[in-house]
Amino acid sequence: RSTTSPALFNRCVVDWFGTWSPKAMAEVGKEFTMKLDIGDSESVGGSWGIGDGEMIMNAVSGAFEGVSSGGFRQAVVAALVDIHEITKRVADECALSSSSTCRTFLSPRDYLALIHNFVSCVNKLREQVEDQQLHVNAGLTKLKQTQENVAELKLALGSKKAELREKDNLANLKLQQMVGDQKEAEMRKAEAEKMSIEVKDQGIEISARKEEAQRDLDAAEPALRDAQAAVKSIRKRDLDEVRNLFRPHINIQLTLECIAVMLGHQNLEWAHIRKLMSKADFIPSIIGFEANQLTSRQVELVKDKYLEGNDDLDYERVLRSSTACGPLYKWAESQVKYSIVCNRIQPLRDEVERLEKDAESANRQKEILEQDVKQLEDSISQYKTDYAQLIRDVESLKAEMKTVTKKVDRAESLINSLSKESERWSKSCEGFQDILQNLVGDGLLMAAFLTYVGFFDFKARLNLMERWRDSVDLLGIPFRKHLNMVEVLSKASDRLHWQSMGLPSDSLSIENAVILDHSVRFPLIIDPSGQAINFIMNKYRNQKIQRTSFVDNSFMKTLAGAIRFGTTLLVENVENIDPVLNPILNKEIQRTGGRSLVRIGTEEVDYSPKFNIILTTKNPAARLTPDICSRVTLVNFTVTPDSLHSQSLSLTLKKEKPEIEEQRINLLKLQGEQQVKLRELEDQMLSKISAVEGSILDDDRVVDGMEQLMTEGVQVEKQIATSADVMKQVQRAISKVEPLASLCKNFFVLLLSMRELNFLYEFSAKTFMNILESSLQVTRIEGQSDDDRLVSLKTWLYQEVAARIGRSLSSEDKMVFALILSKLRGKEIDLDSEDVNVEYLTEFIKTEFGDDFPWQGRGLNQLAKVTNEVDSTCPLMLCSAPGHDVSGRVEAMARDLKKELSSVAMGSSEGFATAEKMISSASKIGTWVLLRNVHLCTEWLEKTLVKKLQALSVTTNPEFRLFITSEINPKLPTALLRLSDIIVAEAPGGIKASLSRFFSSISTERCNNAVNNRLYLILGWVHAVVQERLRYIPTGWSEAYGFTEADAMHALDVIDSLVDDTTGGKHVKDPDLLPWDAIRITLCKGIFGGRITKDVDQQVLDNLVSSLFTPSCFNINFKLVSTDDSPMLPDETSLGSCIGWINSLPSYTPPTWIGLDGSAEMIRSKSIAQSVISKYTLIGNELKSDSK
């Protein structure tokens, strides 16, 4: 670029900063890692960089002057510097490789990124390990504590069992006592009840007797009461009147005698009776008289004498006799009657009294029994209370023991279930120390991986990792030998999520996803297949990712919006970075007044920390400048053989066994999810255990949670086992298709290796997948077995690969490719034979594959079929030798098929604009476009056409076809070669074909002079001989000189100029007047001779030119060679005569016509065979290298 602006140097002082020296890098590395904790290796002491590592240490020793040299920190800085230098050397080696299509440049920015990644990786890994160690140690401590608690609970459980037995025995004793007292109480109760019945019966009988006596008493008692009332009513006057009588009426005397008898007086004299009546208690004694005071004799006496025995004496008579004696008589009568009743019921009363005594005795006995029963019942009640308490105590103990036993059982089950985890965690503890010891070495390798490997293919990555390990090992920095970068830098759940987002499952793609996830700088993704772009779009779908490109009219607006609102921006077709992105890629963020700003052009935009920009290109051969490489992290998603193997297997299963493929995909996804779930459950277990405060057994929620996690874990393990069993069945079905997928992988490795032979041989994964898909379209024969189907598919695939790839190869390389195909089939050619020539090789190919095997390729002769094989997004590129124009074949096919074909010759700016319009229009309406001679505009091809082709999609009209013709030119963009289906149209060999091409390139206006036409014919012959002898190297020429069609055209101009100068532009009829010497010298020393370096070859050229460019060449029957079968120039040399003469020549050119003997053909055949064998060996070695 500097040469395009000389004024820049004339008017400026240029201070050129080249790459940093090892000392400068060491100073920077030392400064940025000074505060990094690199462990106690420095303080413990040791030796680093001894022996072979001493030179690496010395390279950075200048930065550690004044500091103890040879220390661990110096070794770390030396490793950083050496890793950077190793990567630069590998990048240069890859760039010089013949198979390289793209290169990267390393700058100090990459070194700074390496340091940043190193510091970040060490800190993150240390934090992660220490955190895990804390959790694991806490978990193991809790498990150990749980085991101790279980042991304590078992001891407590033993004492509880003894207490339970004691309580149980006591409860049984109480129960026995209660049962005994219960029996006695029931017996006493039965006696009491019996006694109660007896007492009740006695009471009934007493009541009956009492009722009977009471009835009699009740009958006599009213009269008695009436009499007593009448006695009470006796007036004292009336009584005194009677007492005062000396000679009372008989009725009165008898009545008062009756009263005296009843009162118990023996003396019945009236005087005595008068005396009795005068007593104050006379009336009260009568009133208070009790019936039981009368004896039976008194009753009989009163009854016989005064009452019933005396008819003359009754109440009315007595009352008439005396008002006072009337009531007394009535009392005596009623009292006697009452006494008679009482005497009559006395036995009944006695019986009642006896019965009452018996009843009282029975009642007392009943009360005693009831009291005994009550005491027994009280005792039983107390027994029950005591027993219930004991039972409660027993049940409480049992419940407590059950709880403890359950807790112990659960704990033991938990401990047993966690035995594997505990063992693994214990090993992890040991592993943590190993990780911490190797932390710095691992951090160096991880940082190098994240910083550098993204650009390189899988072979270069392995090479880099090996060299980095050797460097770190030489310096004595410990590291883990089998460190898996993917495992240590990503989680299984993340990888599963990525694959669900469309990330291919091959190791290179997963590594790239890890690099993207940890990228310090914004990434530039090289993605020829477009799979990575789809993955990115799916991954950032929720972040409102937008797609754009530098050619988008609204690019600046889209960019500003994404920066401001913190969304993700995917920029496509990036090979040169727009300068507007430099501040963004450099992260030149200005912070002003709490705002973060970045400059976009002339505008300052608020910068969101969530903003993300991802640059992509589909061109695997993008010419990345050092400036681009220094600002981004390169990530190369070019398809690997392993990835193609997976794609081939998937495609084959979809076509042949769609149900198996669906099951396989689902199982792979399920297995991934199950493994992730199992890992998450283990982490949850560890987190739960380590987070418990106190004993695990004291927190049922933790135990329940752990049991649930263990249950889920067991279920997941069962699911994994089930999935594994199902996968085995699926794998058995897949194994029948696996050989075909392995063959596809071998084919792809072969196609990649073909780059070693020619720059044209750029075959993409899409090219091969199209071939495979076409092969799978073959209809299956009814009743064909799976094994037979596989054989037929393999056969068809061999044929399609040979036919479609063969057309892109030169004739010599077709044989090489066919021989390699034979080798892949297990049949190698015998190269020890002495008769190895072209015929031998072609015969081997025919014998191995059959006469119909299309190893020559399906090319120009089947152009219409080839056109149907490509789709609307794949241009058909026809590459030919200079001067061999095959565009006419395309035009003729379009006429035959009645297709509308638009054609434009490239090479001018007008042609560029026309071509773009044609492609844009035709891709929509479905017509054809032919771009001719695109080798004249390789820069336009790379900058414009490639991007336009990459923009074509499935929405392009399927009838659209783009044809491109070009000379074979190393400047053709690799991206175009990979996008195109190529037909190498080699010019037919022989003088006739060469002369035809030569004259077809001469305009008709130029051929109006017969003399000049004869000179042109001789020149064409010389050029044809010169070209034909190239086919016979080293016999024809000593080496392969670069003779081209341009040499002949230049010679044509020189001859015209010399003739015009000699004749003054006039037609000359005399051949002697022509400048023969000048013509011969110009051709021999300048045009043709200028390319020759060997004297022997120069002598051959001199003889050839001198024998033809002579005046005698105008003679009739002039022989072009001194042989019997030599062709003779035509008599007439008009343009038509010349063309007719050329057409009359045989297609095969005998070696004698070009000055060689008859053995030259055999020598040439063997030479070609040797070249084929050399290339065959080269490709074979490449295949072996790739397989390793």
Image (cartoon, rainbow, N blue to C red):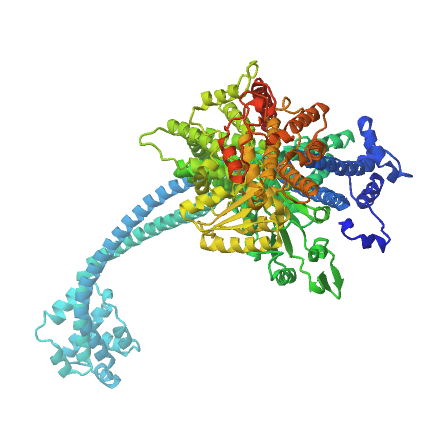
State which quarter of the image contains the C terminus. Answer: top right
Residue at the outermost front position: 1070
Q: Is residue 1174 above or below residue 236?
A: above
Q: Residue at x 38, y 48 (%)?
A: 372
x and y, in percent, of residue 257 in the image:
19, 73
Q: Quadrant of residue 608?
A: bottom right
Q: Residue at x 21, y 56 (%)?
A: 205
Does the rendering let one see residue 1008? yes
Viewer-proximal residue, 292 or 482? 482
Viewer-proximal residue, 71 or 536? 536
Q: Horizontally, is 667 left or right of 635 in the view?
A: left
Q: Quadrant of residue 229?
A: bottom left
Q: Residue at x 78, y 38 (%)?
A: 81
Q: Horizontally, is 1036 left or right of 193 in the view?
A: right
x and y, in percent, of residue 174 in the image:
44, 41
x and y, in percent, of residue 874 in the image:
51, 45
Q: How many marks?
A: 0
Viewer-proximal residue, 1142 or 1151? 1142
Viewer-proximal residue, 689 or 1149? 1149
Residue at the outermost left position: 311
Residue at the outermost bottom position: 237
Does the rendering let one see residue 160? no
x and y, in percent, of residue 1087 in the image:
69, 35
Q: Horizontally, is 303 left or right of 665 in the view?
A: left
Q: Is residue 168 above or below residue 596?
A: above
